[in-house]
Image (cartoon, rainbow, N blue to C red):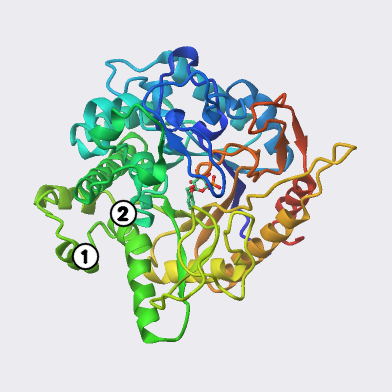
């Protein structure tokens, strides 16, 4: 057997990218509800008030809110043993600071988890997948305000208590390290709910790449998220000692572009800042040494990292390390190097790799490498790949079939890489592909960037009837799960 018997096989979605129903049953706006779509060359834009003439992709998304029964049945049809999804914070606390939770929101997730249980599917629940309540951004300044830690904990306590017998696997913040990946407006807003006053009051659309960002404020907000995450881990274990609570890191694996030692060192710095900083805080419970140097050299006042908080971080280390893996990038100090295409990628082009239409370089071997590196860094912590997938344009044939061989090839390579890593001795406990049902892209806001085994008839011009149909990859993944990764 190449994969352990208890290995979790499934897929992952985020509420804001699949649910839609954006003002139903008491829900109010969250950050992604404020964003318009873009494409590979055009950044998404933000407008602080609703524009009746604009198309907001998250408002209807793929209508999972009304179709979850059909969708979960389709996932069960592939033999999923787990399903990663997020609870939309604004369904539970629509303003973020409401006295009482919204019962209709709580009832919705009860129904979703009950549906999963019907098929023996274990939910893996992200507490915050960019769904920061919009009023927390405008009224509190997002996570840069310490009071928001308490608001988040109240939310976490509410849902962890309510679902303590239905959900065992929890992740605190999706891709908590994105503020370190781009340090642009998208990451500050998505990840931390932080936006400068001037932009909040803007009367015109602002491309996310042009939002103003104050570095000091970003690091303070990120620190508050670390504290919120650690306190949630502690709290969760009090609510149910069987909970497995993880972090979630967007793993941007990097290679030096050349053997020039200067490139190797530049790569080390990138890897430390992008990945290891947040990973170490959540797994080891302390800021790594290289960050004190970074703070010093970047003029960051670190007085917000108090003794008391350092104790909290130590006491709230995670039970598992979970991460997304899509691509790898090269790092170089040589300025003439060719850059990768695509608005969400960083770094230099790797001459040995092909890329998706969005410039994301396809690198299955990099997953085996990443798993080994992580297992070496965190030897006592189980690992789980909670996002991996291939965003592509899909074509529906005359007869309704969708031949997505490119997606099958992508997954085959990455599952093969995980099997190798298991042979290497890596403690890998599960795998969820990104977007098993087509959904809205987080980076570009497009429907056209599709990830699913299941196609959704919905398009960037707002047309489509939301009907679902299986792509070729559906039966393929079903076979993979049934054979425990043997039949690829
Ligand atoms: P999209 C950037 C780089 C790597 C992962 O991304 C990222 C991002 C932000 O877009 O995010 C994760 O939809 C994220 C998901 C997202 C997925 O990757 O831009 O957790 O919400 O949809 C894929 O193609």
Q: Residue at x 37, y 37 (%)?
A: 240
Mark 1 residue crowding within 10 angstroms, few (<14) / some (14–19) / many (20+): few
Is 409 left, or right, of 62 in this rendering?
A: right
- Badge 2 or badge 1: first in the primary sequence: 2
Q: Residue at x 55, y 60 (%)?
A: 341
Residue 11's image quarter?
top right
Residue 261's image quarter?
bottom left
For marks 2 and 1, give the CA distance.
Answer: 18 Å
Locate the C terminus and report the quarter of the image it occupies: bottom right
- x and y percent of residue 309 in the render? 15, 48
- x and y percent of residue 29 in the render? 41, 23
Q: 29 or 337: which is nearer to us?
A: 337
Q: Residue at x 45, y 86 (%)?
A: 259
Residue 158's image quarter?
top left
Label 1 residue near ligand 1, CB within 8 Å: no
Question: Looking at the image, is 428 positioned above or below residue 222?
Answer: below
Q: Which residue is mark 2?
A: 282
Is 252 left, or right, of 424 in this rendering?
A: left
Q: Which residue is mark 1?
A: 294
- Number of the label disc, if any, that sits on residue 270: none
Q: 292 or 300: which is nearer to us?
A: 300
Locate the N terminus and report the quarter of the image it occupies: bottom right
Question: Looking at the image, is 82 positioned above or below residue 67?
Answer: below
- x and y percent of residue 49 in the render? 38, 22
Q: 268 or 107: which is nearer to us?
A: 268
- x and y percent of residue 424 in the render? 55, 74
The answer to whether residue 414 of the structure is visible from this angle is yes
Nearest to viewer (mark 2 / mark 1): 1
SS at circle 1: helix
Question: Looking at the image, is 64 positioned above or below residue 316?
Answer: above
Question: Looking at the image, is 340 positioned above or below residue 211?
Answer: below
């Amino acid at each position: 057997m190449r994969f352990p018997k208890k290995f979790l096989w499934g897929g992952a979605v985020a509420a804001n990218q699949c649910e839609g129903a954006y003002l139903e049953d008491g829900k109010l706006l969250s950050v992604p509800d404020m964003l318009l779509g873009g494409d590979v060359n055009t950044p998404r834009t933000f407008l602080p008030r609703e524009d009746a003439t604009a198309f907001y992709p998250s408002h209807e998304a793929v209508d999972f809110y009304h179709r979850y029964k059909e969708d979960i049945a389709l996932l069960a049809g592939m033999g999923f043993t787990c399903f990663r999804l997020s609870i939309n914070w604004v369904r539970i606390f629509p303003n973020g600071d409401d006295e009482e939770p919204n019962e209709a929101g709580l009832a919705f997730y009860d129904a979703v988890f009950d549906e999963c249980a019907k098929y023996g599917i274990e939910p893996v629940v992200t507490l915050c997948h960019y769904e920061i309540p919009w009023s927390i951004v405008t009224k509190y300044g997002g996570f840069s305000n310490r009071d928001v830690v308490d608001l988040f904990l109240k939310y976490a306590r509410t849902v962890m208590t309510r679902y303590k017998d239905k959900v065992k696997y929890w992740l605190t913040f999706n891709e908590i390290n994105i503020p370190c990946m781009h340090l642009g407006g998208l990451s500050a807003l998505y990840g931390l709910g932080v936006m400068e006053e001037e932009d909040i009051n803007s009367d015109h659309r602002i491309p996310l790449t042009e939002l103003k960002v104050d570095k000091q404020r970003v690091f303070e907000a990120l620190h508050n998220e670390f504290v919120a995450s650690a306190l949630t881990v502690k709290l969760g274990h009090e609510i149910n000692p069987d909970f497995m609570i993880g972090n979630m890191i967007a793993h941007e694996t990097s290679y030096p572009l050349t053997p020039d030692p200067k490139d190797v060192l530049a790569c080390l710095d990138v890897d430390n800042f992008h990945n290891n900083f947040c990973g170490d805080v959540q797994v080891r419970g302390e800021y790594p040494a290289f960050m004190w140097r970074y703070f010093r050299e970047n003029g960051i006042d670190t007085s917000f990292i108090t003794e008391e908080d350092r104790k909290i971080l130590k006491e709230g280390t995670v039970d598992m390390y979970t991460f997304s893996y899509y691509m790898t990038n090269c790092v170089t100090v040589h300025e003439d190097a060719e850059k990768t295409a695509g608005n969400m990628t960083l770094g230099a082009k790797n001459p040995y790799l092909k890329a998706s239409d969005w410039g994301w370089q396809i690198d299955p071997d990099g997953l085996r490498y990443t798993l080994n590196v992580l297992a070496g860094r965190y030897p006592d912590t189980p690992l789980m790949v909670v996002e991996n997938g291939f965003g592509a344009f899909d074509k529906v044939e005359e007869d309704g079939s969708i031949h997505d061989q490119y997606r099958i090839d992508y997954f085959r390579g990455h599952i093969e890489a995980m099997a190798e890593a298991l042979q290497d001795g890596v403690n890998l406990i599960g795998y969820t592909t990104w977007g098993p049902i087509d959904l809205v892209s987080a980076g570009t806001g497009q429907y056209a960037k599709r990830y699913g085994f299941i196609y959704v008839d919905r398009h960037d011009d707002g047309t489509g009837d939301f009907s679902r149909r299986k792509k070729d990859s559906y039966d393929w993944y079903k076979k993979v799960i049934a054979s425990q990764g043997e039949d690829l």
